Image (tube, rainbow, N blue to C red):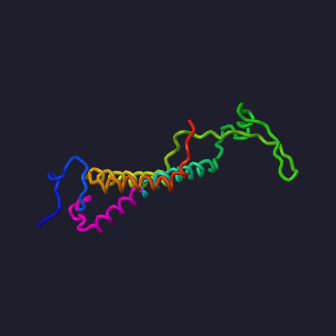
């Protein structure tokens, strides 16, 4: 007797059944232990999904930091940076003191352009990471769309655990 369900037998209301297929008919738990293993897999996948947002934010910060440390070449017939700083209205004169040695310095705010130039070393990894994040997100959505209570609760629990683990590493942006 075949105990699996096909799409025509699936209800559009939440149900609890330990033999609900996940992602394909080949992945149908045949026992309570296999069902528990599938739920654990969904929890881990949801934690990874939540962690990927933190990873992306961390990488964006590192890429921006690296951009800000780049050295730029002064082009002929262009005003040198030192002259632009001295004439910049936003620059401030200050005294820097280290171990009793004082030095006059100009303090300027380095403007960050909202759109950085395209770079292979940044944009390709960013696109790959977002592609993976999208794929994992859609897999989690498909698991929830089975309307299996265990699968749904596993995804929600995984997001909760992921936030417990990774939430503090994702800073609150001030607006």
Task: Name the side, left or right, on which 56 lies relative to 92.
Answer: left
Percent across and percent down for residue 11 are 19, 49
Which residue occupies the foreground of this view, 87 or 124?
A: 124
Give the residue drawn at x 51%, y 51%. Answer: 167
Q: How many marks?
A: 0
Percent across and percent down for residue 173 are 55, 41
Which residue occupies the foreground of this view, 106 or 146?
A: 146
| Quadrant of the image occupied by residue 87 | top right
- Report if residue 28 lies within the magenta region: yes
Give the residue drawn at x 43%, y 54%. Answer: 129
Q: Magenta residues, as a range?
A: 19-46
Task: Name the side, left or right, on which 102 lies relative to 6.
Answer: right
Which residue occupies the foreground of this view, 19 or 174?
A: 19
**Quarter of the image where the N terminus is located:** bottom left
Q: Residue furthest top?
A: 89
Q: Residue furthest left?
A: 1
- Report if residue 23 lies within the magenta region: yes
In the image, residue 33 above or below residue 174: below
In the image, residue 15 above or below residue 174: below
Give the residue drawn at x 56%, y 35%. Answer: 175
Task: Name the side, left or right, on which 146 lies relative to 5.
Answer: right
Percent across and percent down for residue 157 are 40, 55
Percent across and percent down for residue 141 are 32, 50
Task: Name the side, left or right, on which 11 lies relative to 94.
Answer: left
In the image, residue 89 above or below residue 153: above
Which residue occupies the foreground of this view, 91 or 169?
A: 169
């Amino acid at each position: 007797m075949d105990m699996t369900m096909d799409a025509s037998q699936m209800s559009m209301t939440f149900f609890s059944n330990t033999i609900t297929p996940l992602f394909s008919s080949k992945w149908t738990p045949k026992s309570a232990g296999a069902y528990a293993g599938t739920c654990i897999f969904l929890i881990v996948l949801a934690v990874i999904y939540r962690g990927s947002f933190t990873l992306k934010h961390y990488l964006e910060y590192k890429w921006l930091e690296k951009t800000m440390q780049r050295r730029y070449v002064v082009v002929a017939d262009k005003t040198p940076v030192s002259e632009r700083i001295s004439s910049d209205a936003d620059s401030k004169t200050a005294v820097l003191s280290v171990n009793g040695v004082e030095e006059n310095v100009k303090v300027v705010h380095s403007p960050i352009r909202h759109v950085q130039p395209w770079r292979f070393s940044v944009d390709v990894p960013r696109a790959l990471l977002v592609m993976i994040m999208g794929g994992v997100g859609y897999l989690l959505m498909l698991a929830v769309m089975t309307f299996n209570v265990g699968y749904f609760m596993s995804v929600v629990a995984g997001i909760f655990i992921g936030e417990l683990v990774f939430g503090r590493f994702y800073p609150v942006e001030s607006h």
